[in-house]
Image (cartoon, rainbow, N blue to C red):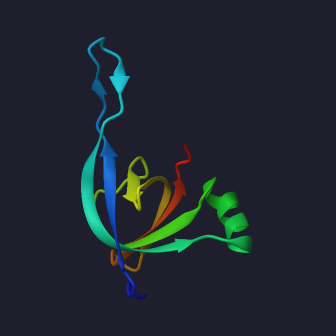
Amino acid sequence: MSLAGLDRRITIEVNTPTQDAYGQPIDSWGTFATVWAKKRDIRGDEYFAAQQMNAKVDSVFTIRWLSGLLNTMRISYDSKYWDIRSINELGRSEGMEIYAEVKRS
C-alpha cells in the first residue's frame, strides 16, 4: 500500500452543536485535524459501483491513519465541504480512504 501523492491539505471538521439565544440548536463545526491527502474524483463505472456501496460518493480522499475519525465528520477543502459517507482502513492502521460527497448549495 502506497501513501505517495499526498499533495493536498484538507481540514477534517467535527460538529459541536450549540444553541442560539432562543435555545434552538445550531450546527457549529470545529477543526478535528488538518492533514495531507490525495484526492481522487470518482467517474464512470467506479461512480456507479460507489453509489451502490456508499450512497452518493463524489471523491475519495486518502490520508495517513488518523485515530478517532468518524463518518459524522466532514472535510473542508478548496472552499467546499464534503460529507464523509464511509471510511476504509488501508493496511494495518497505515492509512485511510474516505469516501465523501460534496455538499451542493
From the top left corner, tell me how far across and down residue 15 is, in percent. 33, 41
From the top left corner, tell me how far across and down residue 6 is, in percent. 36, 80
- State whether residue 70 is above or below residue 41: above
Does the image show residue 65? no
Residue 23: quadrant of the picture: top left
Marker count (numbered): 0
Residue 61: quadrant of the picture: bottom left
Does the image show residue 29? yes
- Front position in the image: 89 or 12: 12
Please report the residue visible at 54 percent of the width from the left and 43 percent of the height from the top.
105
From the viewer's perspective, is 12 left or right of 104? left
From the top left corner, tell me how far across and down residue 71 is, in percent. 43, 52
From the top left corner, tell me how far across and down residue 25 is, in percent. 35, 23
Please report the residue visible at 65 percent of the width from the left and 64 percent of the height from the top.
50
Q: Which quadrant, please, contains the N terminus?
A: bottom left
- State whether residue 60 is above or below residue 6: above
Please report the residue visible at 41 percent of the width from the left and 56 percent of the height from the top.
79
- Front position in the image: 19 or 3: 19
Q: Which residue lies furthest to the top in this view?
A: 22
Residue 69: quadrant of the picture: bottom left
- State whether residue 85 is above or below residue 41: above
- Front position in the image: 82 or 104: 104
Please report the residue visible at 59 percent of the width from the left and 59 percent of the height from the top.
57
